Image (spheres, helix red, strand yellow):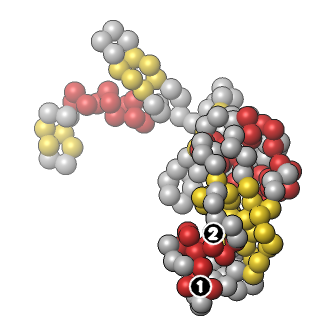
């Protein structure tokens, strides 16, 4: 076998056949395990497995895995958007909890879970036209006592929308401006004077 002027590649012919016809595979001394190629494979912009609706990866035998930006989810794809607060609060894995909350949406989760707001909702000086709101977070959601700052991304996504998300801040922070300032490592007065947060 000769490719590109290189001799001696015939021992690799079997590997080429497997690579063309199978997906993951493991070779052992007396046997091999091969898997079929997936029928669906979806990734986000960073190359992580991700699907907003349904499975991020699925195989011909109907086995599939729901994944949100690289984090495997506990439910089947047909109920990926139906996480009730009780299920989210029971989830032990912090990354899975975060993904479940992102899927539901922080605003909806805050309302459905009955999180207590700290202070008033205020205009975001670093993000004109947007607001900041601070909430107490039950200890069972994260491993430490924290608060969550609900804010909006200062830059538009490719489709023109802005992403609303929650940032955890220390539990001693008492108002949304101080929480936003803490995320930028500036004083509340400095944050109030920002022309635009980035």
The residue sitting at 33% across, 16% down in the picture is 28
In which quadrant will I find the C terminus? bottom right
Instruction: Relative to 18, say whether 120 is above or below.
Output: below
Q: Is residue 155 visible?
A: no
Q: On the image, which quarter does residue 150 sit in?
A: bottom right
Q: On the image, which quarter does residue 92 sit in?
A: top right
| In the displayed structure image, the side of residue 117 where residue 98 appears, left or right | left
Q: Secondary structure at mark 1?
A: helix
> What label does residue 123 carry, if any?
none
- Report x, y in % for residue 146: 64, 53
Q: Nearer the viewer, residue 104 or 94?
A: 94
Q: CA distance from mark 1 to mark 2?
A: 12 Å
The residue sitting at 21% across, 30% down in the picture is 10
> What label does residue 189 carry, if any?
1
Instruction: Relative to 87, say whether 198 is above or below.
Output: below
Q: Residues within 10 Å of mark 2 (few under 14, many from 20)?
A: many
In which quadrant will I find the N terminus? top left
Label 2, on which residue? 179
The residue sitting at 45% across, 31% down in the picture is 24
Q: Nearer the viewer, residue 34 or 91?
A: 91
Instruction: Relative to 164, say whether 30 is above or below.
Output: above
| In the displayed structure image, the side of residue 117 where residue 28 appears, left or right | left
Could you tell which of marks 1 and 2 lies nearer the N-terminus?
A: 2
């Amino acid at each position: 076998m000769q490719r590109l002027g290189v001799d001696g590649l015939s021992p690799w012919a079997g590997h080429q056949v497997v690579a063309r016809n199978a997906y993951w595979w493991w070779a052992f001394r007396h046997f091999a395990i091969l898997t079929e190629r997936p029928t669906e494979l979806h990734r986000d912009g960073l190359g992580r497995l991700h699907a907003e609706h349904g499975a991020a990866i699925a195989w011909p035998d109907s086995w599939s895995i729901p994944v949100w930006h690289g984090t495997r989810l506990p439910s089947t794809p047909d109920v990926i958007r139906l996480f009730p607060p009780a299920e989210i609060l029971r989830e032990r894995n912090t990354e899975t909890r975060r993904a479940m909350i992102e899927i539901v949406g922080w605003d909806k989760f805050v309302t459905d879970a009955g999180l207590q707001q700290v202070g008033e909702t205020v205009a975001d000086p670093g993000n004109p036209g947007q607001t900041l709101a601070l909430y107490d977070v039950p200890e069972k959601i994260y491993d430490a006592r924290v608060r969550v700052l609900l804010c909006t991304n200062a830059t538009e996504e490719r489709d023109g929308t802005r992403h609303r998300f929650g940032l955890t801040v220390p539990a001693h922070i008492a108002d949304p401006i101080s929480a936003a300032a803490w995320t930028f490592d500036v004083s509340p007065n400095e944050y109030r004077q920002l022309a635009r947060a980035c």
